[in-house]
Structures are given as structure tokens and as C-alpha cells.
Amino acid sequence: QVRLVESGGGLVQAGGSLKLSCVASGVIFSIDAMGWYRQAPGKQRELVASITSGGSTEYADSVKGRFTISRDNARVWRTLYVEMNSLKAEDTAVYYCSARTSSERDYWGQGTQVTVSS
């Protein structure tokens, strides 16, 4: 089992910044990749950014150049971050941390609310 706990969400004005954190615990050695997803009211959950064990990153087109995903340790999955700059009202959503293991099992955090006021 992998447990994920997000933090860092909140209310911010358009153009502002937030940094979300996700702490992983449990069988973290089995994690192959981690990512951030978001879900706005009435919309499907979508990928925001992801990072693999090798450090490869992927971003949704809507956040490229504004969001940066990172991890605190290149060898062990402990804390995942996403730094969000130039926030827009359309970035408002619940943000979820996810982890995929080598057995292709997905784990999710409880989510953290990000609200951007225009």
C-alpha cells in the first residue's frame, strides 16, 4: 500500500502562485511514477503533470510554462511538489496526487482545493 497526503492548497488571486506538496509513505520503493491531477466541478479529472523514476516530466498543454513538477529525492519517492505560477481562474480545482507502482496499481491522495479568484 502507498499512502499519499497532499497539502498547500488555498485561495489565491489570479496571477499569484502556490506550491503543492504530496508526501508518500508505505511501499514507496514500488513507485514508478507520480503525478498531479485536477478535477474542476462538472469536469473530468485531468492530468496536470507527471514525473517518472528517471526524471522525465510531462505537462498538460494548459499549464506548460507555468507549472513545474519536482521531487525532493532522486532515488526515493518521498515528497512530490508542483509549483504553480501565473495562476488563472480556470486552474481552480481539487488537485490530487497520484502514484503508479511497478505492478501498475494506482494510488490517490485525498485532494487539496485550489481556488483562484479573478
Image (tube, rainbow, N blue to C red):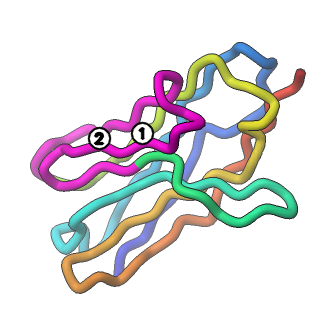
- Image side of residue 76 versus residue 96, left or right: left
Q: Please state which amino acid type lies under the numbered disc 1.
A: Tyr
Residue situated in front as seen by the camera: 8 or 58: 58
Vertical side of 31 occupied by 94: above or below: above
Q: Residue at x 19, y 42 (%)?
A: 73
x and y percent of residue 99 in the render? Answer: 37, 66
Whether the residues at callouts 2 and 1 have beta carbons within 8 Å, the answer is: yes
Q: Name the residue under label 1.
A: 81
Query: Are there few (<14), some (14-19), or many (20+) residues within 10 Å of tag 1?
Result: many
Q: Name the residue under label 2.
A: 71
Q: Which residue is drawn at 64% across and 17% down?
A: 86
Label 2 to label 1: alpha-carbon separation: 6 Å
Look at the image and give the residue range highlighted in magenta: 50-75
- Which is nearer the N-term, disc 2 or disc 1? 2
Splitting the image into 4 quarters, where does residue 12 fall? Answer: top right
Vertical side of 83 occupied by 45: above or below: below
Residue situated in front as seen by the camera: 76 or 60: 60
Locate the C terminus and report the quarter of the image it occupies. Answer: top right
Q: How many marks?
A: 2
x and y percent of residue 38 in the render? Answer: 64, 54
Vertical side of 47 occupied by 15: above or below: above
- Image side of residue 118 versus residue 97, left or right: right
